[in-house]
Every structure is written in C-alpha cells, then in structure tokens.
Image (tube, rainbow, N blue to C red):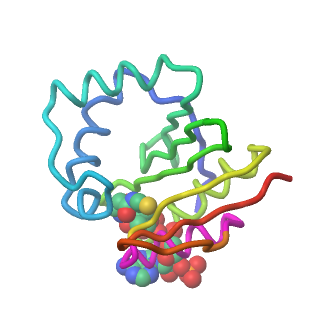
Amino acid sequence: MSDIVLRPAELTDSDRLFQWRNDPQTRAASRKPGGLGRAEHQAWLEDAVSRPDRQLLIAEVDGVAVGTVRADRGDEGCEISWTVAPAARGQGIGQRMVLQLVAQLEGRLWSEVRSGNQASSRIAESAGMRLVEQKEGVKYYVRDAR
Ligand SMILES: CC(C)(COP(=O)(O)OP(=O)(O)OC[C@H]1O[C@@H](n2cnc3c(N)ncnc32)[C@H](O)[C@@H]1OP(=O)(O)O)[C@@H](O)C(=O)NCCC(=O)NCCS
C-alpha cells in the first residue's frame, strides 16, 4: 500500500470530519456517544485548528483523506485519539497512521479506548502503549516518557 501522509487539518476538512465523527461506529467508540450538530462541530474545528496544544491531523493515501489522528498536549503528556474513515477501515490504516504520529512525539502518551473496541486496543498496543487501568468500560493505555 502507498505511504500515509499526515497533514494538519484545515477548515476545508469540516465536512469529512463531521461525517466521520457522526458515523455510528465512531459515536459508539466515543466518550460522548450522542450525535453532534453542524454548528457545534464547526466551532469545535475552528478552535481545534487554532490552538497550540492540539495537533489535529488528516491522514491521506494517494491524496485521499482516509482518517484523522489527534494529539492533545496537557501537563501529563499527550492524549492520542483517532478515527478512520468508514470506507477505509480494516486495511491497517488506523495502525499505520497512529504509529506514524506517535513516532514523532517525545514524552508520555496516553489513550482511552472503550472496552469492546478491539481494533483500537490493538492500535494502542502496536503504538507502544500498554494497558494500565480499566474502569467503567474504558481501557487506559500509556506510553511512558522516553
Ligand atoms: C477502530 C478503528 C480506528 C480501527 O481502524 P482500522 O484502520 O480499521 O484498523 P486496522 O485495520 O489498522 O486494524 C488494527 C488492528 O485491529 C484489528 N482489527 C481491525 N478491525 C477489527 C475488528 N472489527 N475487531 C477486532 N479486531 C479488529 C486488526 O486485525 C489489527 O490487528 P493486528 O495488528 O493484530 O492485525 C476504526 O474502525 C474506527 O475509526 N472506528 C470508529 C472510531 C473509533 O473507534 N475510534 C477510536 C476510538 S479510541
């Protein structure tokens, strides 16, 4: 398969990010399972692309957007989260794009994965994070600072 290119998300990615975010499987995997309105999404994206503590990236294969991966920097390191476009799932994209981002990051990383989300657990593990806690249906994965 062709290389994955990660580029910063832009406001012109609004439609695709909105569709991916409101996809039923994405909602089921999310901390906030309810659907999101268009205006709320737009405000979220405008904030996301402008804040220095958030890296919101679009993964592309041969110029086609296939997913998004995000790093949110806080006092305790970066939280990593991801979504693959519905049409691009099950092809190794999630694993490759997350690995590509975390390979560029120093310091402590962590991710929250809902307990039934086996594909995301695999992704977290193959990105070098280990399961440290499981509570209330959520698994917490951490990679220590290096
Ligand atoms: C979960 C999600 C990110 C997986 O992305 P993907 O590109 O389809 O996953 P990959 O093809 O890279 O597969 C990753 C691993 O999970 C496994 N896998 C893929 N789909 C799976 C499934 N439905 N059930 C169990 N394992 C699965 C793969 O075999 C692979 O494991 P391996 O390395 O042992 O072979 C994608 O389905 C998605 O965006 N879902 C909705 C949103 C979401 O769950 N976001 C993550 C929140 S933490």
In the rendered image, the vertical position of residue 59 relative to residue 116, given as above or below: above
Write the residue at 66% across / 36% down: 75
**Residue 16, position in %: x, y?**
29, 39
- Provide residue 139's location: percent of width, then percent of height: 48, 71
Give the quarter of the figure containing the N terminus.
Answer: bottom right
Does 21 appear above or below 121? above
Q: Main secondary structure of the magenta part?
A: helix
Query: Residue placed farthest to the front in the image?
Result: 135
**Residue 60, image x and y in percent?**
50, 44
Residue at far right of view? 146
Vertical position of residue 14 compared to residue 88: above or below: above
**As drawn, is 130 to the left or to the right of 116?**
right
User: Taking the image as four quarters, which one is ligand 1 found in?
Assistant: bottom left
Q: How many marks?
A: 0
Give the residue displayed 35% in from the left and 30% down from the top: 13
Q: In the rendered image, is residue 88 in sight? A: no
Q: Nearer the viewer, residue 143 or 84?
A: 143
Please name the residue shown 61% across and 74% down the image. 131
User: Considering depth in this image, is 89 or 30 the residue closer to the camera?
Assistant: 30
Q: Is residue 4 left or right of residue 23?
A: right
Instruction: Give the residues in magenta.
Output: 115-129
Can residue 22 be seen here? yes
The quarter of the picture where residue 76 lies is: top right
Q: Is residue 81 left or right of residue 131?
A: left
Q: Residue 82: x percent and y percent? A: 46, 52
Q: Quadrant of residue 17?
A: top left
Q: Is residue 45 magenta?
A: no
Q: Quadrant of residue 46?
A: top left
Residues 88 and 101: in front is 101
